[in-house]
Image (cartoon, rainbow, N blue to C red):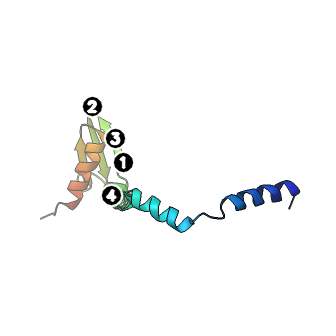
Amino acid sequence: MSDTYQAVYDAVRSRLGGCDIGAAVESAMRNENVGHYFQQACYEIQSAAQEHGRPSAVFKPALTQDGNAWLAILGDLPTGVVGTGSSPALAMADFDAEWYKSTK
């Protein structure tokens, strides 16, 4: 260790000598609503997992535009799955709905 480093280390250590780190952390956690932040993080993780599990995210249909309509297509027409909408997001949402429709 260099002399400068040791001097700084000793000065900081002497200042923290009477500090109760555990009490400081406990106080910070009680003063902040940590449970709320944890619950929000869990919600965000669950929401992201659901988004990544959507058929449109898993199977990645081709997205094309036909005039004002957007089409999300997987497979060949007319046997494939097709979603339509006025925006790419709406076409993908319609694709997800079409994916889950049962064929009779």
The residue lying toward the viewer, choosing from 96 and 3, is: 3
How far is disc 4 from disc 1 in space, using C-alphas?
Answer: 24 Å
The residue lying toward the viewer, choosing from 27 and 63, is: 27
For the point 33% across and 56% down, the residue is 51
Q: Is residue 82 left or right of residue 13?
A: left
Residue at mark 1: 62
**Pointers 3 and 2 in contact (C-beta within 8 Å):** no
Mark 3 falls on what kind of element?
strand
For the point 40% across and 61% down, the residue is 30
x and y percentages locating residue 8 in the rendered image = 78, 55
x and y percentages locating residue 37 in the rendered image = 38, 57
Residue at mark 2: 67
Q: Count neighbours of disc 1 (C-alpha within 10 A) and say few if under 14, some if 14 to 19, many if 20 or more.
A: few
State the mark number for residue 47: 4
Q: Closer to the N terminus: mark 2 or mark 4? A: 4
Furthest residue to the top?
Answer: 67
x and y percentages locating residue 84 in the rendered image = 23, 44
Residue at mark 3: 64
Q: Closer to the N terminus: mark 4 or mark 1? A: 4
Q: Nearer the viewer, mark 4 or mark 1?
A: 4
